Image (spheres, rainbow, N blue to C red):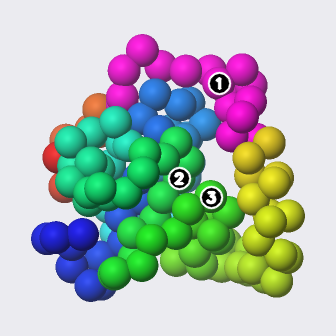
Amino acid sequence: MAGLSHNRRVVLFDGVCNLCNGAVQFIIKRDPAASFRFSALQSAGARRLLGARPTVDSIVLLEGERIYAKSAAALRIARGLRFPWPLLYVFWLVPRPLRDWVYDGVARHRYAWFGKRDSCMLPTPELRQRFLD
């Protein structure tokens, strides 16, 4: 993860998924310290950050040198938001295979349930600095 600061948190998301774009908007509104940055999985920036790692199609959180995916990423993100969202971190106690099974079920149907965009979202000028190229 060359160029990624140890204290920076980057959320990689499916840029054409309406659910994922809604999640990004949700995070932005509940992250007043602007501690999260964002990049669509389809972007060159995400490819640079992930390097030779296998292609992923789920949410990914890069936190320092650590990489979290699926339910682990979602719970770590919730933990970094303002109250009451960090309370969701209690679900870390649920075994990961069960958490990821639920996550995978929603992810498998996300386009059918929430729709899909023709292209990745473009951030507003006010939010541009929160998105990586």
Residue type at the position of mark 2: Ile
* First in sequence: mark 2 vs mark 1: 2
Q: Position of residue 74 (x, y in %)?
A: 61, 63
- Residues under numbered marks 3 and 2 in contact, where contact means CB atoms less than 8 Å apart: yes
Quadrant in the rendering for residue 67: bottom left
Disc assigned to residue 80: none
Disc assigned to residue 111: 1
* First in sequence: mark 3 vs mark 2: 2
Quadrant in the rendering for residue 73: bottom right
Per the model, the C-alpha gap separating discs 1 and 3 is 16 Å
Q: Is residue 128 visible?
A: no
Q: Which residue is mark 2?
A: 59
Q: Secondary structure at mark 3?
A: helix
Residue type at the position of mark 3: Lys
Residue, far top: 118
Which of 52 and 43 lies nearest the eye of the viewer? 52
Disc assigned to residue 70: 3
Residue density around tag 2, few if under 14, some if 14–19, many if 20 or more, within 10 Å: many
Q: Horizontal placement of 117 versus 130: left or right?
A: right
Q: Residue at x 82, y 83 (%)?
A: 93
* First in sequence: mark 1 vs mark 3: 3
Residue density around tag 3, few if under 14, some if 14–19, many if 20 or more, within 10 Å: many
Q: Position of residue 113 (x, y in %)?
A: 74, 25
Residue interval drawn in magenta: 106-121
- Quadrant position of the N terminus in the picture: bottom left
Q: Residue at x 80, y 66 (%)?
A: 97
Q: Residue at x 61, y 37 (%)?
A: 19
Per the model, the C-alpha gap separating discs 2 and 1 is 14 Å
Quadrant in the rendering for residue 8: bottom left
Q: Is residue 115 visible?
A: yes
